[in-house]
Image: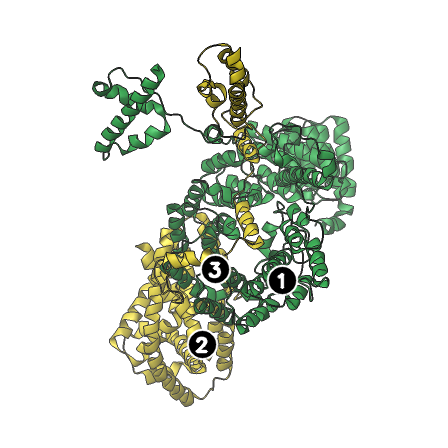
Chain colours: A yellow, B green
Amino acid sequence: MWSRVAAWGGGAGGGGRLAARGCLAARLLTGPPRGRQAAGAVRQERRPRSKIQKLFSTSTVLSTKEDGLTASADSTTKTASKSQEDSAETPKQKLLNIIGNMKVEVSSKKKFQQLKTHETKKQAMNQLEGLDSKSSTFPKTTEDIQRGKPLNRELVEAASAVASSLPLNKEQTESDLLAQLRRHEETTDKQKKGGTINIRNVISDMTIKRESPAQRGVRISNLISLELEEDGKRIRPERLAPQSSDSRRSLKVGRRLNIFTKTSPDTEKALKTESSPTIWDVEFAKEIAAVTEQPPRNGFEEMIQWTKEGILWEFPIDNEAGMEDDAAFHEHIFLEKHLEDFPKQGPIRHFMELVICGLSKNPYLTVKQKIEHIEWFRKYFEEKEELLQEI
Amino acid sequence: MAARRLGGSSWQQMSLLSRRWCLQAGSAGKREQNRYSSSSTTLEKTVENSEVTREEIVLPRRKTWDKLAVLQALASTVNRDPTAAHYMFQDDPFLMPRNTANSRLLSLSKESGRSAAKYIIKEFPQYFDKTTSEPNIPCLMPENLTPQIEGVSEAALKERIHLRGVKASVDLFDQLLQAGSPVSLETTNSLLDLLCFYGDGESAQEKQNEQKGDLEEPEENTSEQRSPKRQFQKSLNSSGFRWRENSNAERIFKIMPERNAHSYCTMIRGMVKHGAPAKAYDMYTDLLNERHKADVHTFNALIRAVPYLKEKFAERWALVKDFLNHMVQQEVQPNVLTFNAVLKTLRRCGGVGRGVSLSVIQEMNALDIEPSLATYEHLLHIFYRSVELQPSTIIAEILEEVEKRSFTPQDPDDANFFPTAMQACCDLKDIKLAYRLNKSMEKGDNWKFLDMDRLNAYWSKFFSLLCMMEQIDVVLKWYKEMTPSLFYPSTRSMFDLLQALDAANHLEVIPSVWEDIKQLGFSRKQDLLEELLSLMSREEHPEETQLAFAKCAEDIKAAHEQSGRDQAPLEWTGSALGHVVVLFSRAGRTQDAWNMMEHFQQINRIPTDQVMDEFLNCAKKTNCPDEAIKLVKLAASFGLPSTLKFKSRTEQEFELSEKQKNTLESIQSDSDSSDSDSDSDRD
């Protein structure tokens, strides 16, 4: 749960900095009951520092307690703050508003101290007395901001410009500030809605970070990325609101393109079997085969490769290697069955048995040739039968 | 007769048995399978069912073995030996490679030797006319590449196209045209195929030579993002040939009396392949004007060319969508390569790509097209190669998918998946993901997707992640497992390892790491030596460790002094010298330490006080007042402000003879004089 707390603390401190700051100040000035709460919170802290520092200090306190996570918390809050700045920045009107808020905030610092001592709620008008005498605080704020965390340079510049142009006329300032306060009240309400969303994002980011092992590497890398972000070089343009949540993305959900429609396999086949492979197909097949082609990892695999290339005897090794016909060995050797047309006994039979004996030992003839050979003798003896009869 | 009877009864037996099995089919399905694979189960079965069979003898069926079965069974019994280099390097111990560069050199030279032999056979077939082997081995004999059909005819042209003689085919085609005999559309198309594939004028031999040369690929990955234009020429134009205006292919295409869709398609594919995407697009519009339909390969090629046709991300995606819609209109069914091409294009579309890529995956799912590894690789690239990493579940989901399936290569980009995924794990610093990835890489035949270079990239990424995130014991275990049988560490990996050792306070392992560094040939990498020395000399260690460290220091010293055949000796840096002195001093090797001290003068560097302190301590320990005095002298000659300090220490801590005292006294004078300029020298 620490992470969540840290996120909130950080979120309020870093993320919602501008909004929260301005909001607090405004509440104090107009004096709703919630303003008192905030003041109380400040009092608990008991540090006469600016609120920025205070809030950051709380987050660092947390960070010492669980160092793995706070780094990530910091970074997330930072991004949140950045996105908020971005969204607020775009219209110029809003920028002015924010500058106005800052002004109020700075003065409110003074006020907290006063509140602490007086412990009474006063009208905003009365309070504002002490404000413009504090115009010297402006440079300090800008300084604070620079020292603290990344405000856009443009924003800082604009703030300083406003600070320098601040009129010394008391009444003028008062009414200006009040007008700005009223305007700012509206914007805070607007931003509060946006702000809560952002904080939710922060939290969702947080939970994801927490899953990953909180180890040295993560910490270091986050610190590095923090540093990079600080000098403002690495701000990604696409970090704007709708795109920023990669965490919600998934392979399973989402819309499809809806361009193609599924076809039945029959038509696919019909399309495929129309032409003979071209050189493109042949070469592509080769390329694909080369993807998983690996050199042999051991002697046996090398032998497999050689077998495939036809260099090696095929296993199991027997005396049939290289024989073209598909006859089994017994057809080569047992040739008696071809002698059925010959006489069962007598010199011819004897002669033929010698012939098949010779044939069965002859490795150079195919079975067909052997049978033809026997056939030839059969025909020969049939032709000569008459002669033989005479004898 | 007896045999026949037996055979007959055995057949009865078989049928009987099989009938029995049919009855038991539910329970004994596994046995059923076994029956065919080995005869022993059958016999077993017979014994079991003795009441049915009595004393019958069952002859096993003759089993025909696949010619590879025996070898495959044997090969599966051999595991990887973690201490040995790859099998491919094992023939000569002298040539055994020690680092990446060597292993690559050796494998390439083996391959080039093989292709040189092939070249000779091909060039001089007349010397290889004796068939000595029986049966003949065709792959060792020259291929017959000379055309058999003489004369000018379409059949001769066909044969030349089949033999892939680009030039001969074009010449013959021209001759046929001049003779006025028409060439059929089909033959012309296959001639166009040949010309477009080889990019006009490239011969078949050239192509085969570079088949194995997968040298350039790792560089490709790094430069991809930066310069799409250059990379395009490199990747799509691997044969180094660019499409020319009025090339033979274009000329023949123009003079063709009639053209069909195939002619257009092959032209488009050729243009894309040889780096003329704009022309390909024009050709495609021509094809549409002629009311032909393109095929799926052509669309794939066109989609791949999109990044070179449009500049803006949104325009690129719009064009891709156009092509996809055209495919629907022309009733072309997409395949996995189509979607891979789309994703590959989306890699170059920045944020647009991130948004759209998942819809592309959904489309694939909807069409029941199984993604290949390249699909996932493109996705990972789209989501994890950007400036900043976002924690997202995409990689976990991809891993889930990959674990579930087995993969066959479908796309040439498939091979990139594992290195890219490991890179993403490394960037996310997520060791659990990396372990999962590694497991799925080792599953089945997946390891085959990693060739030599990718293997190195993959494992060095994995290793640096391990160094960063894991306990040192685990790291060292992996290290032992991985080197040198899987990969050769780079200097980067060695740095990572040293840092891991440092973080885990296991510096006593350094001497063995140093041995490995020497083996790997990194003993002349200055920054690595510096890191090593500073780690070793940072703290005091127990006696034996110090001795081992001193040995390393000696090696390093030797590496500095010995100059190789063609290399200059390494330059000493001040800090390295200091570290070496400290290491020698701590090991009590005063003389060696002093020798190193003298180097400081030679290279005009000044030892730090800490170094000199250590040396003095050592001199005291080994009771060498002479060395101490020499040190004071040295310090004085540098004009160091600390000279006085050392001098007083020497006086107090050593028992000096009269003569030594005198020499020590005499040093005093010149130390103050040169004090001022020594400070400026210091840096």
Residue under numbered circle 1: B275
Q: Reply above or below: B151 against B281.
A: above
Q: For the residue marked with disc 1, what is the amino acid?
A: Gly
Q: Nearer the viewer, residue B375 or A245?
A: B375
Q: Position of residue B510 (x, y in %)?
A: 56, 34
User: Quadrant of residue A174 in the image?
Assistant: bottom left
Whether residues under marks 3 and 2 lie with C-beta atoms below 8 angstroms apart, the answer is no
User: Which of the labelled discs sits on residue A89, or is there none?
Assistant: 2
Q: Residues within 10 Å of mark 1 (few under 14, many from 20)?
A: many
Are callouts 3 and 2 both on one chain? Answer: no
- Nearer the observer: mark 1 or 2; the answer is 1
Left or right: B68 with respect to B169? left
Q: Position of residue B298 (x, y in %)?
A: 53, 62
Rounded to the nearest whole Å, what is the CA distance between mark 3 and mark 1? 19 Å
User: Which of the labelled discs sits on residue B229, or is there none?
Assistant: none
Residue under numbered circle 3: B338
Can residue A38 be seen in this snapshot? yes
Q: For the residue marked with disc 3, what is the amino acid?
A: Thr
Q: Reply above or below: B218 against B128.
A: below
Single out the residue that lies furthest toward the front: A390
Q: Nearer the viewer, residue B612 or B252?
A: B252
